[in-house]
Image: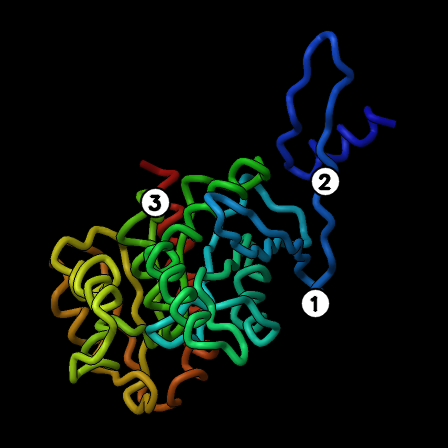
Amino acid sequence: MRAAVLAFALAAGLSPCGSSAQDSPRVEPPPVFVQVGPHARVHQTSVTREGATTTLWIYLPRAPQRGRIPVVLVAPAGASIFFGMNLGEESRPEHLPYVEAGFAVIAYSVSGAEPDHATGAQRLAAMRDFIRSSGGIADARVALEHVLHTFSSLDPDCVFAAGHSSGGSVALRVAAALPEIRGVAAYAPVTDPLRLDDPGGQLPLALRRFYEGVGSPQVSAHRWHTPTLLVHANDDRVVPVEQTLTFRAALPPEVPVELVRVPAGDHYGPMIEVGIPRAISFFRGLCERAHTR
């Protein structure tokens, strides 16, 4: 029976635990995947490190893939600049297109989500957790380390980040901080949180300092190094397109950047209809170049 379980784990691309000559082989049970749509399956789990727990939704393509599977880390959208964000069912339309195109998707929560009906003390604690995670950078790092250790079928040379709105801000932060990220796609991202949400300078001091440093993609723009796709609608009423245009203008000229301005569609639709299809092509091109160097 143990041999059968081991064979199943290896066939699924899992890394089995080691064993000694004295002990019976110990094999971690393979993750349980649930079918989501005709082309994808998902495993939901969580990883706790240094007292912080990150929720992961790990999607793999249903069809067998040739070679290792490229990876897209997807941050959740919908948070204010004060807090992190949990994963929700409403995010699945943002995940599945990548999987249907042959990518693995690692959707991860961002520490410091605002609790429902929170007290002032709870809100303050959540804000501190968000800052402690560097606005999702720590969550993305934990997620990536976990999946690359667990699934040997994933391609460590083709790891990308993506996100929409506040999730786009997280994706840009992650791309700036993690050297494993080969490219990033940000849809209607918040690139300058202080300019968007705190023009009067009323944020708590710790949060303001965070957004004056690593928390702001705009602050990091002059030292940018990651190939980047930016997609934004001209009529976005939630995050003005100027956020993306100002960020693009500050990026070094040697960095490969694609800017797609969608004439209309407001805040959400352009990501689904234009952004993600364009990102799939963008990521595939970067992956091909990574393997032909």
Closer to the camera, 119 or 246?
A: 119
Q: Using the image, determine if residue 147 lies above or below residue 251.
A: above
Who comes first in sequence, dot 3 or dot 1? Answer: 1
Residue 292 percent coordinates (x, y): 35, 38
Q: Using the image, determine if residue 177 lies above or below residue 21.
A: below
- SS at circle 1: loop
Please state which amino acid type lies under the numbered disc 2.
Answer: Pro
Please state which amino acid type lies under the numbered disc 1.
Answer: Gly
Residue receiving disc 3: 289
- SS at circle 2: loop
Please state which amino acid type lies under the numbered disc 3.
Answer: Arg
Residue receiving disc 1: 37
Relative side of 57 to 260, left or right? right
The residue carrying pointer 2 sits among few (fewer than 14), some (14 to 19) or many (20 or more) residues within 10 Å by Cα, namely some
Q: Which label lies toward us, 1 or 2? A: 2
Mark 1 and mark 2: span between their CA atoms? 21 Å
Residue receiving disc 2: 30
Q: Residue at x 75, y 19 (%)?
A: 25
Residue contact between numbered discs 3 and 1, judged by CB atoms under 8 Å:
no
